Image (cartoon, rainbow, N blue to C red):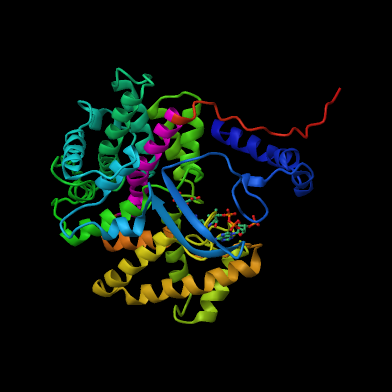
Amino acid sequence: MEKKDLLANYAASKQNMCITNDTISDGLFQEYGVNRGLRDVNGKGVLTGLTRISKIVSFKDENGKQVPCDGELWYRGYNVKTLIKSIGPNEFGFEKAAYLLLFGELPDQAQLDEFCEVLGNSRTLPTNFTRDVIMKAPSKDIMNSMTRSILTLAAYDPYTTDSSIENNIRQCMQLIANFPMIAVYGYHAYNHYENDSSMYIHRPDPKLSTAENFLRMLRPNKQYTQLEAQVLDVALMLHMEHGGGNNSTFTTRVVTSAGTDTYSAIAAAMSSLKGPKHGGANIKVMQMMNDIRENVHDWSDRDEVKSYLGKMLDGQVFDKKGLIYGMGHAVYSLSDPRERVFRSYVEHLAEAKGRQKDMNLYNMIEEVAPELIAEKRHIFKGVSPNVDFYSGFVYEMLGIPSELYTPLFAIARIAGWSAHRLEELVGCNKIIRPAYKSVMEELE
Ligand SMILES: CC(=O)SCCNC(=O)CCNC(=O)[C@H](O)C(C)(C)COP(=O)(O)OP(=O)(O)OC[C@H]1O[C@@H](n2cnc3c(N)ncnc32)[C@H](O)[C@@H]1OP(=O)(O)O
Ligand SMILES: O=C([O-])CC(=O)C(=O)O
């Protein structure tokens, strides 16, 4: 028997022991008033912190009663939809919103120009970093490849552990600037070594925005249209920030509170974001849609689509996890405002690109899935499509490879993580250490 089989067989033989000894019954959670996943029975999160960075609205007060409402997302006092609308036809919004999230106020033109200039000039990697780090052991999992790059960047920083606020601002801005590079170069290395394609390492242009640079570095001929860059810019703005409680931002805050350095905190956040129940859902949605296209004979037959989705919820088909990806949210009830914005773009793009049949299938799933989930699960606050439902479809129509969908989320969310790291360092300064009630038995 090969050594690796020996270990795999041993692990398989121990599986049931772990399941038996690690299962904790619902009754014990109830007895001690412990909320699974830090969520109460109505799905509301346990309050664990205060923040000024953003606000999520999913319930409204009606005559003293909290009732579900359409979702709203606010960055530092501004509704994200208003922020997006305020971006002029020849402007890009990601940088403006990043300044807002990091420093708490909207920049005037001179402040924005200065910020963009600093960010643009910071889009460099240490000498030979692409060859020595990114091109070594390339992986299809670009989130892992980026995380490896982030941790290795720490080794090139003489002030890694300096916890002053100015040093943290410098490190966060350096990572915001570097994220598109380590993502796209990681993809090209993988595409070359694993898919036998040509490799392109285009340098970023310091005068271009994050969205433009991403497309410039990705495309072999560096070309993109203004519309493509603007759609991507809006996508980035929609993904930048989502409160302190989402899994990756909470991770950032927990790890930051232990006093660790910026690189380690952001690497931890990356590891959270890639989870299929969080930012990794955008790839899962695309895989799920492909699976539906393959297995549903008539995509326009509502009953056939519904029946297949029902099997998915019962864990019989697709990845057998019992989830319909791109649906549901820990906070939103009737709608996720980001999905609504994406939807308006998707409709135009699908028409322009002749993808009407796919659009109809998405529309049908958007209608049927919430009904089905409500039938088969305990839903207290309503279930609706989330930001990940359409994002992959938009990226696909922009010709972006699926390996880069979750990395794109990270390229945007690094701004929110950075803002929360700074807020934790400035305003909290207390290690996060919740309690676990022990239900262990003492044995002789
Ligand atoms: C950027 C983002 O992170 S957005 C979210 C991206 N994730 C996905 O799209 C994955 C699919 N969705 C889900 O797994 C869930 O909706 C989550 C993880 C996002 C939120 O889950 P919860 O916080 O448990 O939501 P909620 O309290 O409303 O769920 C109630 C029940 O419905 C289930 N449920 C919610 N959404 C779904 C879904 N899409 N498919 C199947 N079941 C679902 C939950 O598992 C839960 O079941 P349980 O009571 O047996 O535990
Ligand atoms: O808030 C959450 O739990 C997940 C989410 O939508 C995000 O992080 O953007």
Indicate the quadrant where residue 238 lies: bottom left
- State yes or no: residue 405 in magenta: yes
Indicate the quadrant where residue 95 lies: top left
The extreme right residue here reads 444
| Residue nearest the viewer, comparing 254 with 362 | 254
Image quadrant occupied by the C terminus: top right
The extreme front residue here reads 63
User: Which residue is pictured at 69% across the width and 37% down the height?
Assistant: 14
Image quadrant occupied by the N terminus: top right
Indicate the quadrant where residue 67 lies: bottom right
Residue interval drawn in magenta = 401-426
Point out residue 3 in the picture as x, y percentages from the top left corner: 56, 30
User: Which residue is pictured at 29% across the width and 57% down the height?
Assistant: 84
Q: In this rendering, would 299 be left or right of 312?
A: left
Q: In this rendering, would 368 be left or right of 389?
A: right
Point out residue 237 in the picture as x, y percentages from the top left corner: 32, 52
User: Which residue is pictured at 43% across the width and 74% down the height?
Assistant: 363
Q: In this rendering, would 411 be left or right of 209?
A: right
Q: How many marks?
A: 0
Question: Magenta span: helix, strand or loop, mainly?
Answer: helix
Please determine whether, in this image, residue 240 is positioned above or below residue 269: below
Q: In this rendering, would 88 be left or right of 167?
A: left
Q: Is residue 386 something one can see in this rendering?
A: no
| Residue nearest the viewer, comparing 362 with 211 | 211
Point out residue 166 in the picture as x, y percentages from the top left corner: 31, 25
Point out residue 371 in the picture as x, y percentages from the top left corner: 57, 72
Q: Is residue 195 something one can see in this rendering?
A: yes
